[in-house]
């Protein structure tokens, strides 16, 4: 996986009641084993309560989302190009902030540097108000993928104060400032109501969490105790895709494809579909860890194809209809070099190369909503990058859709909600700062 902090090439829904009910129902055993009937009845009661709570939260979120969208009115986008009103979001005092997730409640989550830019914290913006989510005791934390649920759960990664016994860089180190990015254990986390909870590993040192759905499930990847010979130092331990929840403390491994040694889960929806990567241990961040794009259906890995490359095949988001966006090297001749193209995979169809904006050479698709609007980043050969919106088969520079009065450059769009709101990162040339933004449709 690669994100704006990881390489110079990157500047870097709602769940309906039927979905919730069907997904939870299918997770229950049809015929409990002898002696488990009472536990099954309790589980069913708990499931029904969770479904009712999820529905109530969902309805409230959709109503709040419609109000927050203002003149957007309805979640369904209008045909043609819609102008956007863009607002820069408050920082924690450093010179770099970015929004990675926007849900249907209008909550934007991401990260913001602290003064001095030697550390950064996971950040939540609600109606423009900033909340520092803190850490697990270490210097850094971040939200790095679209989280999407409307139940008030924010998912990301955070360092603890405990030293890393193997001194790995781990996946977290690619997203934190070099001065403080390693030397600590790093965990995936779920944050809710002011409390950050670490997510357990498979027995190894570290974990990494990306998204959570409306069923109380979170996905990511975690180290086990295997010293994998396909790892490239300083990475030592093997890691596997995992799904935490819905019960507290529950963790399930999502295996790699046959012949691969590692896997990592990047996104999920409310139907139980999970997407991610399968490959070799490598550096624990993309490249040959991402030999294959994978969809897990009922826990089983399915190779969903590629664009011809042998590395950096990375799904980034999946909507409730099973549409997947991400990025992948377009040719095997690229080897492990990062030369991505944005892709869209509609369920039941081959992966589509979405191309780039005119004059650009690389692209990444990073978020998608239920209306099959996708957002991402397109960059030229000199690493000048622009945010894009893809819809109805056309990729458009998001900067060309911005209303009057906004002069900053939108460099990447990381997520889009079902009301068409977009978050990402822009560059304020006057201040010399990278800013998190929220773009709202004007109609």
Image (cartoon, rainbow, N blue to C red):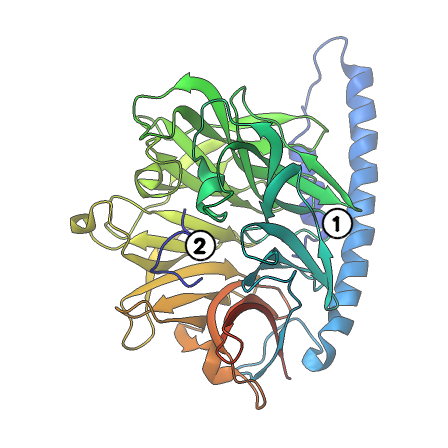
Image coords of residue 140 (percent x, y)? 59, 44
Q: Are marks 2 and 1 in contact (CB under 8 Å)?
A: no
Give percent across and percent down for residue 85. 61, 81
Is 282 situated left or right of 274 in this image?
left
Pick the front one: 316 or 5: 5
Residue bearing the label numbered 2: 5
Up/down of 251 relative to 62, above or below = above
Spot occupied by residue 223 in the image (x, y as percentages of width and height): 49, 26
Sequence order check: which comes first, mark 2 or mark 1? Answer: 2
Tell me if 106 is positioned left or right of 211 in this view: right
Q: Specify the quadrant of the image occupied by residue 43.
A: top right
Outermost residue toward the front? Answer: 116
Q: CA distance from mark 2 to mark 1?
A: 28 Å
Q: Quadrant of the C terminus?
A: bottom right
**Residue that numbered label 1 is attached to:** 151
Q: Residue at x 65, y 69 (%)?
A: 89
Instruction: Give above or below for 134 relative to 88.
Output: above
């Amino acid at each position: 996986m690669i994100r704006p902090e990881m390489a110079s090439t990157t500047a870097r829904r709602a769940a309906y009641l039927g979905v919730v009910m069907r997904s939870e129902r299918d997770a229950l055993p049809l015929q409990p084993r002898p002696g488990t009937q009472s536990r099954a009845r309790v589980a069913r009661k708990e499931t029904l309560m969770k479904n009712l709570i999820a529905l109530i939260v969902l309805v409230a979120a959709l109503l709040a989302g419609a109000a927050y969208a203002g003149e957007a009115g309805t979640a369904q986008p209008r045909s043609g190009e819609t102008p956007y009103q863009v607002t820069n979001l408050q920082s924690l005092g450093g010179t770099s902030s970015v929004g990675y997730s926007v849900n249907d409640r209008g909550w934007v989550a991401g990260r913001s540097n602290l003064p001095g830019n030697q550390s950064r914290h996971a950040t939540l913006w609600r109606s423009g108000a900033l909340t520092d989510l803190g850490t697990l005791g270490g210097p850094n934390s971040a939200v790095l993928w679209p989280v999407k649920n409307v139940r008030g759960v924010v998912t990301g990664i955070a360092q603890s104060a405990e030293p890393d016994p193997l001194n790995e860089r781990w996946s977290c180190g690619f997203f934190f400032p070099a001065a403080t990015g390693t030397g600590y254990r790093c965990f995936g986390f779920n944050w809710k109501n002011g409390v950050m909870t670490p997510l357990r590993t498979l027995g190894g040192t570290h974990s990494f969490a990306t998204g959570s759905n409306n069923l109380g499930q979170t996905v990511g990847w975690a180290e086990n105790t295997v010293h994998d010979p396909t790892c490239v130092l300083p990475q030592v331990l093997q890691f596997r895709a995992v799904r935490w929840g819905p019960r507290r403390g529950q963790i399930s491994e999502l295996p790699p494809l046959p012949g691969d040694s590692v896997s990592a889960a990047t996104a999920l929806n409310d139907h139980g579909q999970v997407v991610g990567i399968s490959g070799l241990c490598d550096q624990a961040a993309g490249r040959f860890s991402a030999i294959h794009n994978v969809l897990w259906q009922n826990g089983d890995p399915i190779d969903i194809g590629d664009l011809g490359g042998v590395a950096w095949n990375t799904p980034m988001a999946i909507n409730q209809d099973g549409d997947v966006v991400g990025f992948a090297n377009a040719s095997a001749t690229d080897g492990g070099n990062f030369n991505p193209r944005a892709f869209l995979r509609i369920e039941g169809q081959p992966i589509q190369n979405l191309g780039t904006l005119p004059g650009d050479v690389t692209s990444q698709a990073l978020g998608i909503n239920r209306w099959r609007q996708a957002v991402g980043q397109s960059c030229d050969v000199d690493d000048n990058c622009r945010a894009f919106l893809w819809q109805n088969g056309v990729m458009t520079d998001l900067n060309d859709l911005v209303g009057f009065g906004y002069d900053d450059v939108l460099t990447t769009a990381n997520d889009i909600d079902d009301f068409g709101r977009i978050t990402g990162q822009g560059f304020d040339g006057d201040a010399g700062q990278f800013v998190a933004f929220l773009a709202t449709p004007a109609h």
